[in-house]
Image: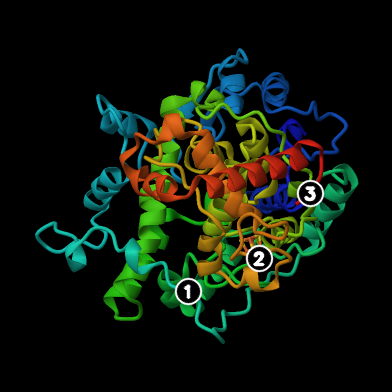
Amino acid sequence: MEEARHVPHHPQKIALIFSAMRHFAEALKQRGTQVHYVTLDDPQNTGSVPSELRRWQSLIKPDELHITDCGDWRLEQSLRICGLAIHWHSDSRFLCTRAEFADWAAEKKQLRMEFFYREMRRKSGLLLNGDGTPVGGAWNFDADNRKQLPKGARPPSPARFTPDVITADVLALVAEHFSGHYGTLDTFDYPVTHADAQALWEYFLDWGLAAFGDYQDAMATDEPFLFHARISAALNIGLLDVRKLCSDVEAAYWSGGIALNAAEGFIRQLIGWREYVRGVYWLKMPDYATGNALGNTRSLPEFYWTGETKMNCMHQAISQSLEHAYAHHIQRLMVTGNFALLAGIAPPQICEWYLAIYMDAFDWVELPNTLGMVMHADGGYLGSKPYCASGQYIKRMSDYCKGCAYKVSESTTEDACPFNALYWHFLMRHDELLRGNQRMGMVYKNLDRMADTKQRALWQRGEMLLARLDAGGSL
Ligand code: SF4
């Protein structure tokens, strides 16, 4: 109960974890392993992992207690001080151990994901020529992965997994105990066993992967999944193995089934970014969680929990998140994250939202991605510049603006896209901190070229929009 309630997790995420645990317990029993599985509503259940371990320690008096590294600093700390002698094991869901990452990071002033990723490519041997050079002559083909979705493009229908009896029981339990949490349970269709997660993966290999690279940054109205694999939650809870996923993608490339930018882009997400953010998390916690380099204090607007906003991009990204506990990386970074950055939302509040709302979000992955990448609250440790953008970026990468009450072509009128004025307001109010950043030079040149009257009008509209948020209004 403590793990399910420390933030208001999406009910589908709680259901996924409980159902996957129950299926795994059953699988172990069938293999002849003795399992003691404590259900949430067991009257003996004391409600927290450390207290349950102490209870079972005295009940069954085991010779030894073995635990895998946790995904959450808070939980691991509570276990390390709970008074039990624990044998700790490194987490096989990752290729790079915490100690290996710490060795790589030692004495580096800034940790660049790109260099870490190259190390991981060399270590894993993925997409390498015989002489150790990268296939295709470059390590990274991200520039090829930002195409707009062509008109009439048809993404595959999402693979769905009908709840079995165990999952149906869990869904009822979650409905009973977590009805106050945001998000619906009604659309739960996620795999809860290794076999079903494997089926989801194979579906992606057949129908999604070839187009994944080109369109991984694209967004489309009422298309929550596009060509994305949707396997991150299954991977993060251990239903899939990162080595197998990478070798399958590499094999698809070698067989000629997919282009290099699709294969490299997918593998980089897994052995580059995913391992890197986890390494940073364990290297920098607990201080990392308190970062607030931009001094943000604004409360998270209520519409993050309801989707009730006239901004169509925000409405689409938030509504699908509440419906599926899922949004892809650009919706998270450049729509909901971009808005939180521009509006100056207090980092703990936006971090809690991401941790609560997404099925794949655990502290090790959510915190660096939100606090560092989205909010630039770590002062640039993770990303060398803030990922801020006006409505023009969203217009380029989606069809959201066509169905929006605001005009993306306007900046200062009453019906102007809020992202536009908030973008310039963000740059003006953080001028002192960001102007010296080499990667921000061009945007500040554009600001300097702007007439004073235009700058003042943008500032005033930005102030008005922020005041509306402070008064508890929506946009
Ligand atoms: Fe979003 Fe602005 Fe486009 Fe509306 S006009 S969808 S608020 S980017």
**Amino acid type, callout 1:** Gln
Answer yes or no: disc 2 within 8 Å of ligand 1: yes
Instruction: Indicate the quadrant of ligand 1 in the picture.
Output: bottom right
Task: Check disc 2 and report its element: helix, strand or loop.
Answer: loop
Q: Badge 3: few (under 14), some or many (20 or more) residues near its Cα, within 10 Å?
A: some
What distance separates the C-alpha of mark 2 from that of mark 1?
Answer: 20 Å
Going from N to C along the chain, the mark reached first, 2 or 1, is 1
Q: Which residue is mark 1?
A: 148
The type of colouring in the image is rainbow
Asked if the residue at tag 3 contacts the one at tag 2, i.e. Cβ–Cβ closer than 8 Å, the answer is no
Q: Quadrant of residue 146?
A: bottom left
**Amino acid type, callout 2:** Lys
Q: Badge 2: few (under 14), some or many (20 or more) residues near its Cα, within 10 Å?
A: some
- Of labels 3 and 1, the one closer to you: 3
Residue at figure coordinates x 73%, y 27% from the top left:
48
Going from N to C along the chain, the mark reached first, 2 or 3, is 2
